[in-house]
Amino acid sequence: MSYVKAAGLMLIIHLAFAGLGWAIAERAGAMIATLIALGFHLLVFWYAERIVLKLHNAREVNSDDPSPMIRAFVADCDKLAMRANMPRPRTYILDSFQPNAFMAGRDTSHASIAVTDGLLKTLTRAEVSAVVAHELAHVKRGDALAMSISAALAALAAAVIGTLVYPFGLRRQAAMVISGLTARMGRSHQREYAADRVAGEICGSPINLATALLKLERHTMSLLNPLAERSPATAHMFVIDPLQGPRRGASASHPPTERRIARLHRQAAEMEGNEE
């Protein structure tokens, strides 16, 4: 399904480019635009992960980092990846007070997990591990491809189309439409619920993820994430919607947090029942 959604979004962007080419120079314009779109798609497929990380000024970190919090984050990523029976993802830090996290990549061998420094300062280590487990669950389930490609494609397409419609004063509206489409193509409510459940199994405590989501929901509503606001097409990649104001929840990229928490509490009860 991840490949189908990624292909669907590529087709939509391809048709948009061809349509603009036709409007500018009819058949010749459409042919040139089609060739440009093909190159565009190849570029995005191979570099989507880097594009998304670059949009958020992500800084790669490792076990030698001077910060104890970052070293703990990297160590827990290693431990959880081993528990999930998958290669260790690359680890990144985002410079933002807003606590949040996202993953990017193509598959289990090409994946990155990025967390904000605000997340490391807001959550307990167990809660950070639970959030990491959620992102690893997306990678393990094969969600990474559609989510990364949709974000990179939409961010670049929004920039191109926004420039074309700028003289008409429609740049903001174009960005909102594209980011909304991206969210629906790149992420689904059922996918989030499934990743939450797998995360509970990986980290061993659905309750830790539930308490983490509750804290993240409260803080993301009051703390701004400037880079996410500047690139709303990537909002669907975060564990909690990073946007504020009218944009928050407008694209329905995330299921209601209270429902996610309720499901995690039910999962915890099931796990306790199985142990008895």
Image (spheres, rainbow, N blue to C red):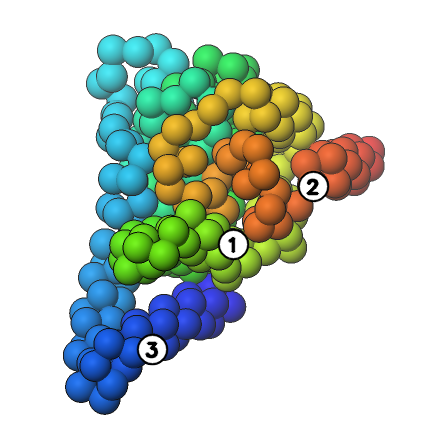
Q: Is residue 62 above or below residue 267?
A: above
Q: Is residue 181 left or right of residue 157?
A: right
Q: Using the rendered image of the protein, determine whether residue 78 is visible from the camera's viewpoint.
A: no
Write down the residue under mark 3: 19
Real-space CA distance between mark 1 and mark 3, rounded to the nearest whole angstrom: 20 Å
Q: Categorize mark 1 by other alpha carbons within 10 Å: few (<14), some (14-19), many (20+).
A: many
Residue depicted at x 43% and y 27%: 225
- Residue 146: mark in rendering: none
Q: Amino acid at mark 2?
A: Pro
Please tell me whether mark 3 or mark 2 is closer to you in this view.
Answer: 3
Q: Is residue 136 above or below residue 203?
A: below
Q: Is residue 28 left or right of residue 131?
A: left
Q: Using the rendered image of the protein, determine whether residue 90 is visible from the camera's viewpoint.
A: yes
Q: Is residue 181 above or below residue 10?
A: above
From the top left corner, tell me how far across and down residue 24 is, in percent.
Answer: 24, 76
From the top left corner, tell me how far across and down residue 241 is, in percent.
Answer: 55, 37
Q: Which mark sits nearer the N-terminus, 2 or 1?
A: 1
From the top left corner, tell me how far across and down residue 181 is, in percent.
Answer: 50, 59
Q: Amino acid at mark 1?
A: Gly
